[in-house]
Amino acid sequence: MISRRELLALSGMSLGIFLTPKGFSVGKIFENNNLKPALWASITRDNYLILLVNKSEMGQGVYTGLAMLVAEELDFPWDRVRVRSAPAGDAYKDQKMGTQLTGGSTSIRHMHEFLRVLGASMKEMLIQSAMDEFRLRREQVKAQGGYVRFDGRAVPYGELWEKAVRLPVPTKPKLKEPSEFIYLGKNLPRVDAQEKVDGKAIFGMDVRMDGMVYAMVERAPFGSKPLSFDASEAKKVDGILDVFPISTGIALCGASVDALLEARRKLRVSWSKSSIEGLDDSNLEKLFFEALRRDGRVVERRGNINEEWQRATKKLSTTYLLPYLYHATLEPMCCVADVKKDSCKVFAPIQAQTQALKVVKDITGLAEDRIEIITTYLGGGFGRKAHVGFVAEAVEISKKTGKPVKLIYTREDDVLSGYYRPMSAALVRGTLDERGRVSSLYFKVAVSSGIDWASTQGLEDMPYQVPSLYVETISVNLPIPVWFWRSVGHSHNAFILETFLDRLAKLGNRDPLDLRLELLKNNPRARKVLEITAEKIGWGKRQNVGLAYHFSFGSHVAQGVEVIFEKGEVKVVKVVCTVDIGPTVIHPDLVVSQMESGIIMGLSTFLGERVSFSNGKPTTLNFDSYPILTMDKVPEIEVYIVKGEGKMGGVGEPGVPPIAPAVANALLWGYELEINRLPMSLYK
């Protein structure tokens, strides 16, 4: 984190990346304030590199990966690199996205080129500074390891930086060739590791302010509004300061969390009737399958699906039902806000700074330069913390009370607030030609409305070459809020697609690996990850193994699993994952750890995760009823990284989609089980 005061102190001797009419360029902050810097870097007198990063660190290693890009080109000692979160503001937007946001597996992909240019520019300016000061020729000087070296001398970068930063900025600095890399492609220590180990790292829950009070919100059931409330008994609780309505429910403020919890039990609220009152899991199932009978929006159509269906002698039709999922971040939503008459300060574990700044401006009426939003470390995000409703609530409460407020969601609050991964149902049909080749695929998908653009991700843009393809989507309108969940639409559509391909392979007496390779005959990157995975998992040597492949966020991922199914229980013994994220791998261990975490998260959803409903409300309110995978259930995981040709792909999300279908496919071939709905616990 970095405060406005620290930011201003750095700005006089910093470089930034600027968006100009001709694109990005590097410039000096103090000369180019009007150009809106998108990222800053400086070197202190005692030779530390300070980077301000416009992406949120939520465990994925983005601080480390982005810092490596600058340190590589600058040739700076890694143990003297320090990273801070950039403040929220238009100046720090990811210009490829048009917003300051961490999501879509884009952080390294979008920032790597610009950060390398930044580091290279700094290096050339330091060399020029030494040349000017010591009257040297270019061939006499080199910058290496944080020192400018010449004539047997080594001058720390920090001693030259204040003069270097005043020199003209190189327009096209020379970047290193891969053969010259000292950091990129290596497993450097994470910059955030030490402070997380020793307890000094500041997460949202750790923030304290003088005079701070605590707050909680009693929120309306989905589709309801508060009609009236009685807080007379709640206000009698020792430590309760105030109870009042806000836009999302009834806010309670107090001196302690315990006081708030007791007061909430005594608060009486009358809610309007919900449009989903009485709804339960069976009603939801009926609603989604009924939606499949309606006409939807066609998003992809090629070939002639109807003709293929009519003439095929081997064809298959089935339906799928996949549940709402909770993000289950170990740190629930929390935010500290201090609204004053002429300023506002917010500390929050957020993924979407631009959106947070907007809601703060809307609520306070303050100008952007009077608002300070500081991003803490995130105790998990997975997309949930890109929704900033919890920031709005904290700011609204602070504005009302005139005090710094720490808003905390309990685990139950977090579940009841919604913003789940959408529920979906699908009707899927496919045909084989006389040679057993896939000749057509038909997908009609009904998905909870809210993020409709993601409803057919992974289907409409699948890399499989199928002669006839039809994809249609239908929105199911319910007041149950949905939101981005790690890998978004790919998380459910990969399961539908990949399990259905294995069903077709079984129908045609085909090897499912061969069937996929045939469909990917013009995609060598996809074929390679599948072939490596098949070899490593021991494909063809036993029946209880399964494969799945998926392309998402620019990366190709194949996963193979070995399973055991006994007495109604699934045990995943081993997972092999092969990933191709393109020609450049910044930090291999970060890639491996993200694949591992995606596999664990995806496996958890396969085995047991589901938001269940009764009487219009979720009933799976904590980890006793919403089980996430525990360490004793985590399988052996092997990850192999392939460097393929083409653009750089993402890492944070692509590991999630293939694991659930891979396990289902292993159960199909090894145990004759067809899994058409999740989680697996429903089959007990």
Image (cartoon, rainbow, N blue to C red):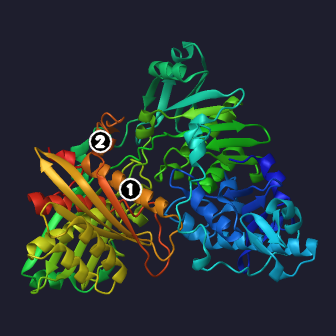
Residue 619 visible to the viewer: yes
Crowdedness of circle 2 by 10 Å Cα count: few (<14), some, many (20+)?
Answer: few
Q: Measured from the top left, where is residue 5 in percent x and y? A: 81, 46
Which residue is at the front of the view, 69 or 106? Answer: 69
Placement of 282 over or under 449, stated as above or below: above
Q: Earlier in the sequence, mark 1 or mark 2?
A: 1
Placement of 83 over or under 165, stated as above or below: above
The residue lying at 81 percent from left, 82 percent from top is 139
Return the residue nearer the eye: 155 or 309: 155
Q: Amino acid at mark 2?
A: Asp
Q: Is residue 488 left or right of residue 511?
A: right
Q: Is residue 23 above or below residue 362?
A: below
For the residue carrying disc 1, how many other residues have a C-alpha within 10 Å: few (<14), some (14-19), or many (20+)? Answer: many
Check disc 2 and report its element: helix, strand or loop.
Answer: helix
Q: Residue furthest front?
A: 152
Task: Give the quadrant of residue 163.
Answer: bottom right
Which label belongs to residue 632? 2
Q: Which residue is mark 1?
A: 596
Percent position of residue 506, x then y: 11, 71
Residue at image x 24%, y 60%? 561
On screen, residue 680 above or below 490: above
